[in-house]
Amino acid sequence: MMEELLTQLKLARIREVYQDWIDKASKEEMSYADFLHGLLSDEVCARGENQIKRRMKQACFPFEKTIEQFDFSLRPELKRQVILNCMDETFVHKGRSLVLIGPPGTGKTHVSISVGIKMIQLGYNVKFVMAQGLINDYVGMKDTGDRQELLNSLARVDLLIIDEFGYLPHDKEAGSLFYQVISDRYEKNGTIITSNKSLRSWAEMLHDSSLATALIDRLMHHGEVFYLSGESYRLRGKKKYLEGDTPSAELNLEMSDCQVKTG
Ligand code: ADP
Ligand code: MG
């Protein structure tokens, strides 16, 4: 009977734990108020956790790393305070953006994911997409209705992370796609882009310099760009193999990874 009522009310967590709470209440002579408060808090807590889990899944992060796991001393050009400033609500509310540019292994994806995780914890929804995957999806849609739906769904996301922008030569249609995505989000919600190409070469990458200028203009109005440099974190301490003539199997893997990514 109790279980049915709790199911009807969609109080899943209470349904799981109410018997324990009843036992605890009678053992500890808990007041009615404390009992009710404890039970309801349990439900609220579980819902919050479930929502975070759901949002983490929807975000499609390729890996999960936090800013605490990021060693800023390796990338002095990336100011800790500026990145920490990206981790508050204004990043979404004020439609701010962050552009991270640098060679492979400098932590661009790591930093973008850590901002994403923080936003999820603050109650926002986040979507992580690979630039190339997005273009392929878009170009593959021949129906304008489907394309519009894809654009609308991207416009609704509180924080959109576009990873590896410009790693591979982009299709001619990429320019209008990215311009549309950025202008839909302009002053409305947060955007992070990672790339291995400087802003200067985005025009060439998008086959249209006025479009690229308009895109960068919107992106930078409330945004910041960081150029990361230095040794790849993936290759740290392995420099001797790069210089020597006996590369390890592990290094071979890393090198082919770099070649694919830099195109
Ligand atoms: P990029 O996107 O620039 O190619 P990633 O963010 O994918 O680089 O980083 C490659 C790997 O190295 C990841 O596992 C990441 O967590 C780690 N990494 C990179 N930079 C740092 C750093 N400064 N501190 C800790 N881990 C790092
Ligand atoms: Mg990356």
Image (cartoon, rainbow, N blue to C red):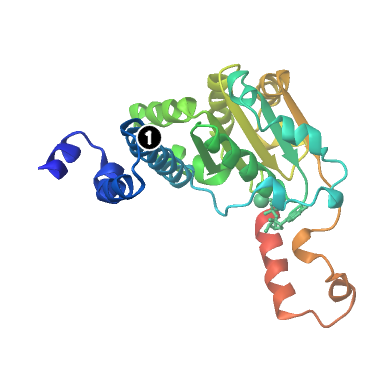
Looking at the image, is 253 positioned above or below residue 158? below
Given the current orientation, which residue lies at the most extreme bottom position? Answer: 246
Visible in this render: residue 114?
A: yes
Note whether 152 is above or below 55 in the view shown: above
Left or right: 52 in relation to 18: right
Residue at image point 86% right, 81% down: 245
Residue 125 placement, left or right of 28: right
Location of residue 35 by image quarter: top left
Specify the quadrant of the image occupied by residue 140. top left
Say whether mark 1 is within 8 Å of ligand 1.
Answer: no
Closer to the camera in the image, 168 or 35: 35
Label 1 crowding class (10 Å Cα cut-off): few <14, some 14-19, many 20+? few
Determine whether the residue tagged by mark 1 lies in a helix, strand or loop.
helix
Residue situated furthest front in the rendering: 29
In the rendered structure, which amino acid carries the disc numbered 1?
A: Asp
Judge left or right: residue 125 versus residue 243. left
User: Which residue is labeled 1 in the image?
Assistant: 34
Q: Quadrant of the N terminus?
A: top left
